[in-house]
């Protein structure tokens, strides 16, 4: 019996990558995971969401963007469920190696393992992406320069700091009783900076560290060495008191920590814990995710960790 001849697989036609596509790919690279709504905020608010989603589908089919498998079963569009989540794809990495971004191959490969990431990490990253996306939009509207961690770390790190050894945004926290009983390391979930061009040097930058709490684990533990938000609060406080950042990020004289939790009740519990740490700290600011999502960035009501006073970052700028 004669074998049926094999029909060659038709190659999918390649799409033409536009400058806006490049900006989209770079945005996904810097945030790691994004939804179409978040991409629209950051890249081009005038981009019609339906057209953007269609473009993302075309980019996905041509391997410029990826859809992490861990999201499916929960993060699927339609029926009131969560929107699709996108990551940088194989062809998208190649685009970013070329002008105008010309990223080093090592940097692009940092986000190469998106297919193996687990669902909790996707959720966690989407919280930080939401905050950063809203901050970018608000800064562009006010003439403030938003500096994300990708560029920030390269420009403010100590010249002798080994970024490969210390990881990009981590630093060692010394023993500083009663806050920290022994030396440890802290890795913020995100860091960024707001630069005010109309202010004098030394007074024109605000540095932020961002913490996202998904509410799935206890934020306190009897084990002082366990990685919890309560432990991070103590590490941030010890960092500020000991000035531990000077050897790693000399430009950061002071900083604000933004903590985003899932519910108001969770925020209340974290505030109680914050006040248990030396009476609290007014550089720890807390808000819940729904408020962050629905409020312009500079108008978000944050509760201070010391006395629970409600402030906005717009008011903080005036101090």
Image: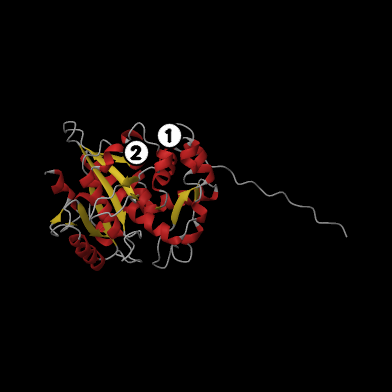
Above or below 205: residue 316? below
Residue situated furthest right in the rendering: 1
Q: Which x, y percent locates residue 302? A: 19, 56
Per the model, the C-alpha gap separating discs 2 and 1 is: 17 Å
**Residue at disc 2, secondary structure:** helix
Q: Is residue 311 left or right of residue 248?
A: left
Which quadrant is the N terminus positioned in?
Answer: bottom right
Depth check, mark 2 against mark 1: the one in front is 2
Q: Which residue is mark 1?
A: 101
**Residue at disc 1, secondary structure:** loop
Identify the coloring: secondary structure
Q: Which residue is mark 2?
A: 153
Which quadrant is the C terminus positioned in?
Answer: top left
Kindly identify the residue that appears in the image at 25 percent across and 39 percent down.
252
Kindly identify the residue that appears in the image at 37 percent across and 40 percent down.
150
Kindly identify the residue that appears in the image at 39 percent across and 42 percent down.
166
Between residue 35 and residue 118, name the one nearer to us. 118
Q: Residues within 10 Å of mark 2 (few under 14, many from 20)?
A: some
Which quadrant holds residue 231? bottom left
Q: Which x, y percent locates residue 244? A: 27, 43
Kindly identify the residue that appears in the image at 44 percent across and 39 percent down.
22
Between residue 3 and residue 136, name the one nearer to us. 136
């Amino acid at each position: 019996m004669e074998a049926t001849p094999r029909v060659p697989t038709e190659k999918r036609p390649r799409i033409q990558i536009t400058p806006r596509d490049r900006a989209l790919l770079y945005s996904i690279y810097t945030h790691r995971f994004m939804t179409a709504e978040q991409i629209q905020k950051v890249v081009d608010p005038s981009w019609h969401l339906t057209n953007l989603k269609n473009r993302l589908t075309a980019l996905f089919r041509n391997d410029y963007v990826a859809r992490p498998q861990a999201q499916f079963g929960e993060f699927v569009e339609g029926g009131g469920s969560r929107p699709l989540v996108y990551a940088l794809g194989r062809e998208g990495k190649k685009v970013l190696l070329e002008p105008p971004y010309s990223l080093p191959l090592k940097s692009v490969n940092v986000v190469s393992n998106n297919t193996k990431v687990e669902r909790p990490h996707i959720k966690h990253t989407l919280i930080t992406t939401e905050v950063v996306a809203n901050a970018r939009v608000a800064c562009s509207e006010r003439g403030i320069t938003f500096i994300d961690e990708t560029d920030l770390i390269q420009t403010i790190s100590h010249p002798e700091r080994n970024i490969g050894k210390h990881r990009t945004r981590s630093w060692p926290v010394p023993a500083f009783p009663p806050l920290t009983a022994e030396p440890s390391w802290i890795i913020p979930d995100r860091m960024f900076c707001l630069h005010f061009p109309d202010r004098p040097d030394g007074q024109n930058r605000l540095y932020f560290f961002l913490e996202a709490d998904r509410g799935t684990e206890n934020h306190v533990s009897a084990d002082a060495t366990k990685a919890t938000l309560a432990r991070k609060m103590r590490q941030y406080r010890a960092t500020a008191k000991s000035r531990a950042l000077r050897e790693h990020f000399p430009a950061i004289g002071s900083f604000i920590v933004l903590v985003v939790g899932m519910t108001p009740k969770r925020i209340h519990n974290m505030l109680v814990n914050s006040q248990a740490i030396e009476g609290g700290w007014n550089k720890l600011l807390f808000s819940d995710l729904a408020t962050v999502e629905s409020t312009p960035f500079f108008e978000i009501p944050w509760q201070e960790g010391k006395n629970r006073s409600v402030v906005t970052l717009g008011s903080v700028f005036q101090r």
